[in-house]
Image: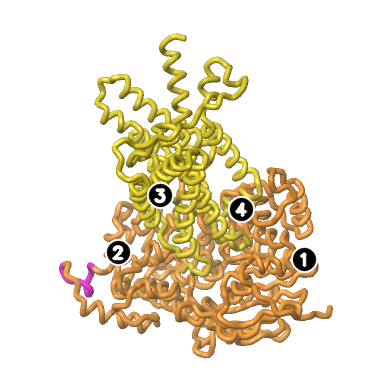
Amino acid sequence: MTGIETFLVEFLKLTFLSMVPFVLAGQGTMLGGRTGVFNVAQEGIMLTGASVGFLVGYTSGSVFVGSIAAMLVGGLFGLILAYFTTTLKMDQFVVGLALFFVGTGLSTLLPKLVLGITLTPPLIPTLKNIPVPLLSEIPVLGPILFNQNILVYISVLLSILLWYLLFKTNLGLRLRSVGENPKAADSLGISVNRYRYLTTIIGGMLIGLAGAYLPMVYTGTFTELMTKGRGWIVIALTFFGGWSPLIILLGSIFFAGIEVLSYRMQVGGSVIPFQFLNMLPYIGTIIIMIFTFGKSRVPAFLGQNYDRERRTL
Amino acid sequence: MEQTTILQMHEVNKTFDKVKALDNVEFELKSNEILGLLGGNGAGKTTLMNVLYGLYKMDSGSIILNGKPITIPSPKDAIAHGIGMVHQHFLQINNYTVLDNIILGTSVSRPWTADRKKEKAAIEELCKRFGLEIDLDAYIETLPLGVRQKVEILKALYRGVNILILDEPTTNLIPQEVDALFETLKIMVKEGLSIVFITHKLREVLHICDRISVLREGKNVVSLTRKDASDEMLVRAMVGEGMDLQKSVIFSESSKKIITTKRETVLQLENVSLVNSDKINVLSDISFEIGAGEILGIAGVAGNGQRDLAEVVMGIQTATSGTIKFMNEDITQSSTKENISRGFVYIPEDRLADGFLHKASVAYNLILGYHNLPPYSNKGIVNWKNVNAASREMIKKFTIKTTGPDDAGGNLSGGNIQRVMIARAFSQSSKLMVAHNPTRGLDIPSMDFVYKNIFEHAETGMATLLLSEDLDELLLISNRIAVMYRGKIVGILPREKFDKYAIGRMMSGYDQESK
């Protein structure tokens, strides 16, 4: 293989590796949004997920147990968001921002409580690649697609599964109706609150897992603010993806691609200052937003609470 | 046929904040009947039925179905008891197909696949049985209101309801569609259903209902069979003792002051077109004129460009082409502010978004738009003494329920907000009034009050452009009616040629498409 080919294969392999947090958090956000709950606490939930995932993984010695813990704590954030917005009917954006701050603070506090202050942070083993038999032998495509860690496969399968559930099944029909017109759904005996709780909690779990992916794959340890704004980018991603699982998957590949590119260029000793390269994902976000915002279809009741007895004037 | 009582509601009470919406209401429904639930706005008809459908929780009272007491804490329970409801504002998912809207919330034969053949066949069968023709694969947002109502009815039928509640079902229908709806209702009663027909329209009740129950201000007034009912006693029951029927515009022929003699032209539109930001022709080639003292009614199904027409005349939007003249002066490019100083008044359709400030005081709201004109201000300084005096006078004259000029606008109910709109409009000695659904949300005496005021101002030479979705209102007070369809005026009829069905045909675009 020539140099450029090696570079491309390596680039695409890393892109698929890096898309996972975007996919998981994106689908989690999409799921809540589809019933009308607009989560803006991704950054905080991801950080807490990263922190808890790492700590539990370290103390238990199992990355799997760490992931489960990250999901549980993410789900807890989802539960709190659902309780404050659907039961107490508080403003979704305000509650979401509050949860972001709680999550960010918690993520740095927890390691200090559990590990104390250490100069050399402990490490957990990172996820191993699992080559798919036969498929990973295919030239070029094999190493890019079929020699990845388990969560890469899971995030692709999850996206397809969610698409099928939302758009092809009776469950999906009901679920989406809650975000499109909760009053109509309610009048047909669909429990608006139940669907909102369910999707917000599962969404929180996915976002928590997205956070845990960072120490489990990239660094082997938790560092402060290690999400680097990925949570915020995910919000743009869901709008770009039209709140649709498959387009969110594509969007995740795009954002991951920009992210890998900016790292590659820094490592490659580019003449462009690294501060500028760090900006790339955000510039990409702004460009995407300019072209898609307002055009992509949003669930009609996104971000709005529903109160059955509120009379419209 | 022997009719048995299937449903009773006893001593139902419901309070919203401090307003008593239902006061010890009794309700009875028999098998195989169409019951008319009659009353003006705010009478409590819809509230009572929302309680029955589980949307509102009653404060006290009981429901007895087929002799057994039941509770209905949510719509799900209502459906389980065989009670269905078609709301005035359709509860549909706009970007779903008709089929998906109908099966939504029901269990299907193959829930984990996209195969809905069995359900589709069952619904097609229902369509045939009840004479409801409809394309099940069409998306709701593409359908006219008449068809969307059929979807609502099918939703209820598909759930196998025995009792169907229809809330003001004829509101957005053209007369032809009303007739078709009545045919369907008759078939349904024959098939064994009982129907509650909520309306404020007397004629419909006398036309279709077997029995009639009248509510006023949240209380039962009278219940009787159609045989025992007369126009006059129902009117009296609906409006109460306080209204003088002989002097009313709505019920008395003699008090209509339709001015027929042609006077000088006040407003003239010549080939006015408007292209919106999506490059869609929302108004095309609109031409008409209104004389002093004349009321020109604009009929049309909601969303055919009425709002844009009102806004172009007021100067809120500027016409893309064509000219608008006021007293022979070209005002096509004039701003709203300039038009208001010329003597334009506007009652906007969406009072909450375009006409009212919730956080401002009632006095603020009453002078809004005229705040820079005398007597409210002098050289840019507001004279609060005059404003408060004028506000108190308007509050009294228009019976606005508020604690006073300093009360926050947001404390007012919908009907009272509409009264503020009306008071503001009639507080000026205006030359041209643009009124869009001016009586929406008002009870009958208030509607009458509005009509009287329009006539009074018309006598002083005010020209009126009345855009309304209530065809009866237009037929009642307009000198001429222009019909709008897809941004065009498809015909203008003088008063002697008013014909409900002809107007209905024009509203539906039937005449357009056959050409």
Q: Amino acid at mark 2?
A: Ile
Q: Is residue B279 visible?
A: no
Dots 4, 3 in contact, CB < 8 A? no
Identify the hue of chain B: orange
Q: Are marks 2 and 3 in contact (CB under 8 Å)?
A: no
Nearer to us in this view, B21 or B376: B21
According to the rendering, which colour does chain A have?
A: yellow
Segment tinted magenta in the rendering: B372-379
Q: Position of residue B95 (x, y in %)?
A: 57, 49
User: Where B339 falls versus B258 (above or below)?
Assistant: above
Pointer 3 residue? A40
| Residue named by callout 1 | B187
Q: Position of residue B90 (x, y in %)?
A: 58, 61
What residue is pinned by disc 4?
A174
Q: Are labels 3 and 1 on one chain?
A: no
The question of residue B373 being in magenta is answered with: yes
On whether disc 2 and disc 4 are found on a single subunit, the reply is no
Earlier along the polypeptide chain: callout 4 or callout 3? 3
Mark 3 is on which residue type?
Val
What residue did someone put label 2 on? B340
Q: Disc 1 or 2, which lies upstream in sequence?
A: 1
Q: Chain of mark 1?
A: B
Q: Nearer the viewer, residue B170 or B77?
A: B77
